[in-house]
């Protein structure tokens, strides 16, 4: 609660995410991840809200802040507002690296492990714990559980190597059958 000239103002505050506590919220980190890891894609505000499963008003507010700060650019096409990173801003490249290292594993693992014959791919361990809000030291690696009965291990390890190259940190895949 903040008191100014006898008036009380309540603020709804979300916790800073343990993965990158300089951000205001996990939502902000996930929004930056969607935008910065796909720099050539133009998103509509509605697409981003749906993709992140957040209210449209929250999405509009966060995008407004990012655009006002010169991190995004937007354009109107009909009734839609299209947004994408402002790659000419010299801050965007290093910010992309930071977001990739912190919030990026979920997106990168999803992309690199997508074509496996897996029933399920799950990130677990310290990175998943930080994403879910658990405090602790920054994760040094990313643990990935790949579940399925007809999984080619060489494809799993190739996907892990590609993800490692993109994320700049070790990826530790664990393969299990559905009956294990």
Image: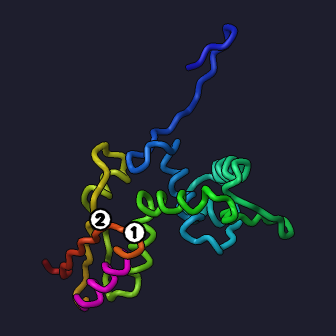
Measuring 25% from the left and 83% from the top, which residue is drawn there?
148
Say the numbered circle drawn on residue 167. 1
Look at the image and give the residue range highlighted in magenta: 152-163
- Give the main secondary structure, helix, strand or loop, of the magenta stretch: helix
Does residue 56 appear left or right of residue 108 in this picture?
right
In this orientation, which residue lies closer to the viewer: 104 or 95? 95
Residue 155 is a magenta residue: yes
Q: Quadrant of residue 152?
A: bottom left
Q: Which quadrant: the C terminus?
A: bottom left
The residue positioned 36% from the left and 46% from the top of the image is 133
Using the image, tell me which numbered label, if any, was put on residue 142.
2
Question: Which SS class for mark 2?
Answer: strand
Image position, residue 82 (x, y; %)? 74, 66
Name the residue nearer the viewer: 179 or 57: 57
**Left or right of residue 136: residue 33:** right
Above or below, 134 against 85 in this view is above
Give coordinates of residue 53: x percent, y percent: 55, 59
Nearest to N terminus: mark 2 or mark 1: 2
For residue 177, the mark is none
Crowding at mark 1 (Cα within 10 Å: few <14, some 14-19, many 20+): many
- Tell me if I can see residue 46 in this picture: no
Vertical order, 179 against 68 (above or below): below
**Point 27% across, 59% down: residue:** 140
Mark 1 and mark 2 in contact (Cβ < 8 Å)? yes
> In the figure, residue 158 lies in which quadrant?
bottom left
Residue 2, compared with residue 56, is above or below; it is above
* Nearer to the camera, 160 or 88: 88
109 in magenta: no
* Residue 45, position as x, y percentages in the image: 69, 61
């Amino acid at each position: 609660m903040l008191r100014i000239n006898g008036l009380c103002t309540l603020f709804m505050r979300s916790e800073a995410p343990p993965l990158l506590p300089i951000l205001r919220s996990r939502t902000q980190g996930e929004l930056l991840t969607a935008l910065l890891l796909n720099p050539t894609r133009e998103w509509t505000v509605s697409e981003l809200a749906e993709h992140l499963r957040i209210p449209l008003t929250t999405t509009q507010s966060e995008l407004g802040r990012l655009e006002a700060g010169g991190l995004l650019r937007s354009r109107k096409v009909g009734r839609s507002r299209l947004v994408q990173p402002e790659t000419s801003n010299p801050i965007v490249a290093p910010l992309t690296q930071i977001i990739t290292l912190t919030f990026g594993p979920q997106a990168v693992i999803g992309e690199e492990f997508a074509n496996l014959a897996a029933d399920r791919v799950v990130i677990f361990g310290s990175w998943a714990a930080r994403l879910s809000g658990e405090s602790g030291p920054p994760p040094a690696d990313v643990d990935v559980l790949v579940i399925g009965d007809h999984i080619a291990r060489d494809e799993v390890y190739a996907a892990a190597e590609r993800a490692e190259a993109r994320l700049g940190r070790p990826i530790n895949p664990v393969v299990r059958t559905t009956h294990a």
